[in-house]
Image (tube, rainbow, N blue to C red):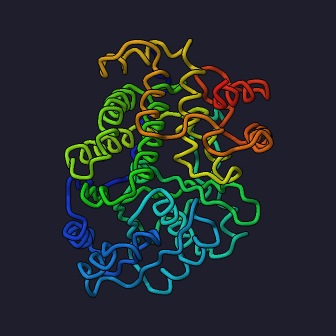
Amino acid sequence: MTFPGLRYRFNGHERVLHDARADEALPELMNTFGYRRAFIVCSRSLNTGSTVIRDLEAALGEHWVGTTDRVGEHSPLSNVLHAARQAFECRADVLVSVGGGSVMDMCKAMQLCISEQAFEREQVLTLQMHMSADHTEMLAGSNAPPRIRQIAVPTTLATSEWTPVSTPVDDLTHQKARFLVPDGGPCGIIYDPVLLARTPPSLLLSTGIRGLDHAINTACSLHPHPLASLLAEKAIQLFVENLPRLRKSDDREAFTHAQLATWYTGMGQMSVPHGFSHWMVHVVGPLGGVPHSDAACVLMLAQARWLADCAGERHARVLRLLGRVGPFADVLDDLLKQLGLPRTLADLGLTDAQIESFIAPALAHPQITKNNLRPIATEADVRAVLALARGR
């Protein structure tokens, strides 16, 4: 196996606290970094359906300056702009995300707005990322030094805390905007397994599959990196072995190991280009009206079937870790069945007309048809993979 370029990308995380209590660890991190004015961004369900946010506000005391739960699925750009203005007017010096991918992505985009002083839709859309000439690396559309950073308290497993990328949906076009935020990776991450266990099981398991999809895309990258591959293979093992255990909310070891899997995944995933399943959710999610993680379940399985004849060595290494034999796609299919998660586009409630509408945006997307270990370059290729996603 060759590793062209051997390019490793570190995304600026300075503190990662594992198996910690968020209400104890957050003030500690605030003190470590010298922050004094925290603005919390969280999901509405967490804010109104539990005491988690009130407990964090109390733990911060005079260092808490505001909270918003106006996030929404795929973090609509209008919500990003509103919250960025709110945090700026509160003179916040750090954003604290408590929630899943939409919450963390929203904080990254808020950081970009505040750093660039761009609080209008047209302004911020000019800052979208672009690809390197060889289509293997994402490049930022902004060079502004960060005026504010994020501390993340993840409550899901999709690994958003490990990237500087934010993809809020544009309210007007219903398409994903794509930002790579300078120093957009959180400066601190707090992994609280007890808080993770509060997440509804269906959401938790599907986001675990999204994290697993990231690990698989890293291990099966067209341009792999030895460290990223090693971490990804271990992450795949941890996800497959521990996701079924998360249905028991008192299995703390499983929750801790699942969060460790996101750490392993995140430490390598930005160092190599990802393939079809990672990016196609950005089309299926907003256009089909389904959560990213649910779409990832189906597309991850379809991609494994698509790669069956050309990823044998990579799949075999993971199968050895799992003590399994047979097609890797069958392992994933069995896992999705066991978890009760969607396996086909029909399981997502998508019609033939909706599926047809995905093809043109997929071909127009800057990454979906790039960097696939088995090429996906033409309309016929996209149709073939979507046929696998239909279960055909």
* Spot occupied by residue 45 in the image (x, y as percentages of width and height): 44, 70
User: Can you say whether 171 is above or below 256 in the image?
Assistant: below
> Measured from the top left, where is residue 241 in percent x and y?
30, 32
Q: Where is residue 262 in the image (x, y as percent from the top left)?
A: 35, 44
Q: Which residue is drawn at 53% across and 74% down?
A: 70
Where on the picture, by quarter, is residue 370?
top right
Residue 143 x %, y %: 56, 60
Quadrant that contains the N terminus: top left
User: Which residue is painted at 56% across and 19% down in the image?
Assistant: 307
Q: Is residue 130 left or right of residue 35?
A: right
In the rendered view, would you say 106 is above or below 49? above
In terms of image quadrants, where is residue 301? Answer: top right
Q: Which residue is drawn at 41% across and 49% down?
A: 162
Residue 11 is at least partly visible in this image: no
- For residue 317, say whether it is visible: yes
At x 39%, y 27%, the residue is 229
